[in-house]
Amino acid sequence: MKKSSLMRRSGRVCLALLSAGCGSGAQGNEAAVAADLPLDVTGDVAGAEGIQVPPGFAIEVFAANLPQARTIRSGPDGLLYVALSQGGRIVRLDPAQVLPAVVVATGLNQPYGLAFHGGDLYVGEHHQVIRLQGPDFKRSTVVVPDLPTGGHWTREIVFGADSMLYVSVGSSCNLCEEDDPHRAAVTRYRPDGSGGVVVASGLRNAAGLAVHPTTGAIWASQNERDNLGDDVPPEEINILSDGTDFGWPYCYGQRLANPEYKSPNRCAQTTPPALEMQAHSAPLGVAFYTGTQFPEEYRGDFFVAFHGSWNRRQPTGYQLVHVDVKDGRPVSQQPFAWGWLTASGDVDGRPVYPEVGSDGSLYLSDDLGGRVYRIRWVGR
């Protein structure tokens, strides 16, 4: 496969701390200067040797030394915002050139979900959703307080075509009946956090949400349960609508009853997945391709990051998957970037979140390697 000159290029990426924001995330909290916070994470940007993509595409490491890089969002300013979840930070990168990354917020509690609305940046922390007021994001306001904690910690968020805020909270367990209706569910709020209504339930852990560019429907990745075998149950892509119940913990897949509950009548009332994927792949971040840099046949298609299995006898996942979309529905899937799981069984990276940049490239975070990759069309 032909490699572009960018794949061979070496550069430097560092985190330049300009300001620290959020603190406790309290109402109206002003960002505090934290010049003494050490951020010595400068490093060489190496190539992406060993990672394969389809013919005509090239992949490179765009940014490195970004520990626990998780969600990526393209901002209204054309820049990329990356959640460094375990470090409690959000950094900003410029797709146009390799420049020092800027820390725009720190002191957060496992930030994961990122969404822009009205020029402000909303952040899903483990226990709450906050709004960072643009354009400098130094002033924070709690929008949705007191989210349930423990268990699955990722708090994915997205603004729908209706300009409402959607918040996903995963389950507290592998398989159980939850006491809190906001767990294993997606809840809709007004942008100020009021009027919360559960719109979809039975979602064990929907760690990726994206809005279909034409239909406006919200698509969600779904991490299914463990302990039924290496190939059961399938992971899922679900298309949300008001009142949908996707079955967990009682059912999985095509309305099949979990043996612990044996509720076939209840399962008959649930909504089956729009697409099933290999069990234990751990789908996390998702994105529709809305750029123009890729060939036309990719436009409007769906990309899913497989974080990779943790308890399957033969490891699986560890790749970026391309889902072909026709008439607003997923119809097929195939690997789009792979090689992080080597033939010897070693794991060199764990993809987390794809995002379309302002340049039309597809960016992909890797929390194990602390990298952000860039995938571009270079021609056959």
Image: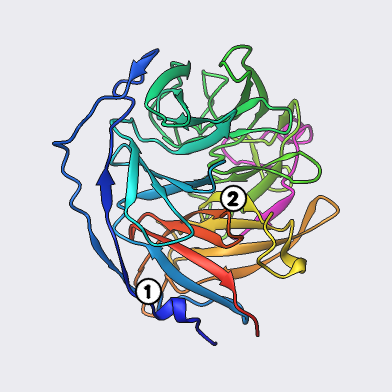
In the displayed structure, does residue 90 sit left or right of residue 167? left
Residue denoted by label 1: 345
Q: Is residue 50 visible?
A: no
Residue found 37% across the figure and 54% down from its top:
367
Residue 105 on image: x %, y %: 34, 34
- Amino acid carrying label 2: it is Val
Residue 157 on image: x %, y %: 55, 33
Q: Residues within 10 Å of mark 2 (few under 14, many from 20)?
A: many
For residue 232, above or below residue 315: above
Among the 4 quarters of the image, the one containing residue 55 = bottom right
- The region drawn magenta spans 256-278
The quadrant the C terminus occupies is bottom right
Residue found 34% across the figure and 45% down from its top:
102
Residue nearest the viewer, comparing 265 with 295: 295
For residue 52, above or below residue 256: below
Q: Is residue 330 visible?
A: yes
Among the 4 quarters of the image, the one containing residue 25 = top left
As for residue 271 lying within the magenta part, the answer is: yes
